[in-house]
Image (cartoon, coloured by chain):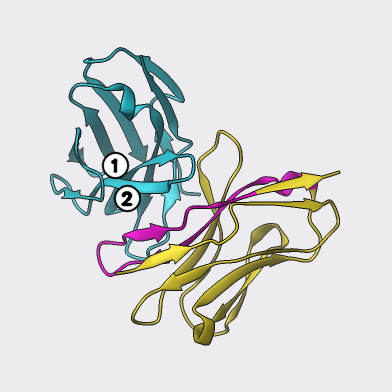
Chain colours: A cyan, B yellow
Amino acid sequence: DVKVTQSSRYLVKRTGEKVFLECVQDMDHENMFWYRQDPGLGLRLIYFSYDVKMKEKGDIPEGYSVSREKKERFSLILESASTNQTSMYLCASSSDTYEQYFGPGTRLTVT
Amino acid sequence: AQSVTQPDIHITVSEGASLELRCNYSYGATPYLFWYVQSPGQGLQLLLKYFSGDTLVQGIKGFEAEFKRSQSSFNLRKPSVHWSDAAEYFCAVGATSYDKVIFGPGTSLSVIP
């Protein structure tokens, strides 16, 4: 079974802090994705990566950056956390079939 | 541009009743279509997918979905709902590149014992 893990299930940070969300997949997938999920808005794509050191902006990249130094790991970085970034963050991976496998999510609260 | 709509924000059904969740998509070619389920506090799990061929697809947990090209729909069905089916359901369509997927806004399902 594909396994996608995220470093934290719950995270509380203060405004202005730099926040790192880590995602690791164990199936050698080329593609990895970061979404945020908010009530009534569904899943919105923040960034995705189709190869090591490659990244592409999604629909809502502002305030975020990403890093992919190894194929299995995709990190989401909030350079200076703000309260409007309080959300559920979901990581996913896939391998050229559009079928995405999701991690359990990180619920981030910025106070 | 691709888009997915799920007309029902929230649905409540009685346990044992049948279920149909609606999904409509906008896409120029033959789409790749998916249904995902998200239990409270969890990530998304794939229920079923349609790539080509038979327009009625079977998935896990007793779910099925039917692709109707003429209606641009991919509705999810289950003949008899169980209390454990209470969750958020997302319809999705595969986009043109890099395995991007466009998700609908979701339908929240409540099940009455």
Quadrant hosting residue B74: bottom right
Describe residue B77's horizontal placement relative to residue A82 as left or right.
Answer: right
Q: Position of residue B111 (x, y in %)?
A: 77, 47
Q: Secondary structure at mark 1?
A: loop
Q: Secondary structure at mark 2?
A: loop
Crowd band around label 2 with a 10 angstrom C-alpha radius: few (<14), some (14–19), many (20+): few
Q: Is residue A70 above or below residue B104?
A: above
Outermost residue to the left: A53
Label 2: chain letter: A
Q: Position of residue A59 (x, y in %)?
A: 26, 50
Instruction: Say which of A111 and A51 sits in front.
Output: A111
Describe residue A59's horizontal placement relative to residue B94 as left or right.
Answer: left
Q: Which residue corresponds to mark 2?
A: A28
Callout 2–callout 1 Cβ contact below 8 Å:
yes
Instruction: Write the residue at 22% across / 54% down.
Output: A50
Q: Position of residue B49 (x, y in %)?
A: 52, 68
Question: Which mark is on residue A72?
Answer: 1
Q: Amino acid at mark 2?
A: Asp
Can you say which quadrant of the picture contains the C terminus of chain A? Answer: top left
Instruction: Write the residue at 47% across / 81% down.
Output: B52
Q: Is residue B78 above or below residue A28?
A: below
Instruction: Write the residue at 32% across / 50% down.
Output: A28
Q: Amino acid at mark 1?
A: Glu
Badges 2 and 1, same chain: yes
Quadrant hosting residue A98: bottom left
Crowd band around label 1 with a 10 angstrom C-alpha radius: few (<14), some (14–19), many (20+): many
Look at the image and give the residue range highlighted in magenta: B83-108
Q: Is residue A73 above or below residue B109?
A: above
Instruction: Write the residue at 30% across / 48% down.
Output: A32
Q: Earlier in the sequence, mark 2 or mark 1?
A: 2
Instruction: Say which of B25 and B32 sits in front.
Output: B25
